[in-house]
């Protein structure tokens, strides 16, 4: 096989392996960031407050 073809194949393979590795690392970091986010906790707290408020308003109106 031609040496240039082998070199190109190895270069392309290395390039894609680096891209895949970089993408996997980005996804892991993004997942960790989302897990650390307080958004789920805050959303849950607001839902609890809204439910309590709605129950209170229903009991006052009846």
Image: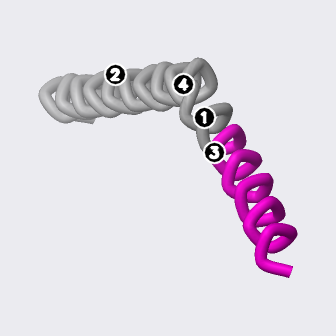
Residue hosting label 1: 42
Mark 2–mark 4 CB contact (< 8 Å): no
Distance from the alpha carbon under mark 2 to that under mark 4: 28 Å
Q: Which of marks 3 and 2 is in front?
A: 3
Q: SS for tag 3?
A: helix
Give me the residue at 47% from left, 28% from top: 30
Image quarter (top left, top right, bottom left or bottom right) of the C terminus:
bottom right
Distance from the alpha carbon under mark 3 to that under mark 2: 43 Å
Mark 4–mark 3 CB contact (< 8 Å): no
Distance from the alpha carbon under mark 2 to that under mark 1: 37 Å
With 32 as the anchor, is 29 left or right in this view?
left
Relative to 32, residue 55 above or below: below
Viewer-proximal residue, 36 or 59?
59
Characterize the local packing of mark 4: few (<14), some (14-19) or many (20 or more) Cα atoms within 10 angstroms. Answer: few
Characterize the local packing of mark 3: few (<14), some (14-19) or many (20 or more) Cα atoms within 10 angstroms. Answer: few
**Sequence order check, earlier mark of 1 and 4:** 4
Residue hosting label 3: 46
Residue 51 occupies quadrant: bottom right
Residue hosting label 4: 37
**Sequence order check, earlier mark of 3 and 2:** 2
Give me the residue at 69% from left, 38% from top: 45
Distance from the alpha carbon under mark 1 to that under mark 4: 10 Å
- The residue segment tinted magenta is 44-62
Q: Which of marks 2 and 4 is in front?
A: 4
């Amino acid at each position: 096989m031609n040496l240039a073809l082998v070199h190109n194949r190895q270069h392309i393979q290395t390039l894609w392996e680096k891209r895949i590795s970089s993408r996997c690392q980005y996804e892991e970091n993004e997942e960790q960031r989302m897990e650390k986010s307080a958004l789920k906790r805050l959303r849950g707290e607001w839902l609890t407050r809204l439910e309590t408020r709605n129950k209170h308003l229903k009991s006052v109106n009846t």
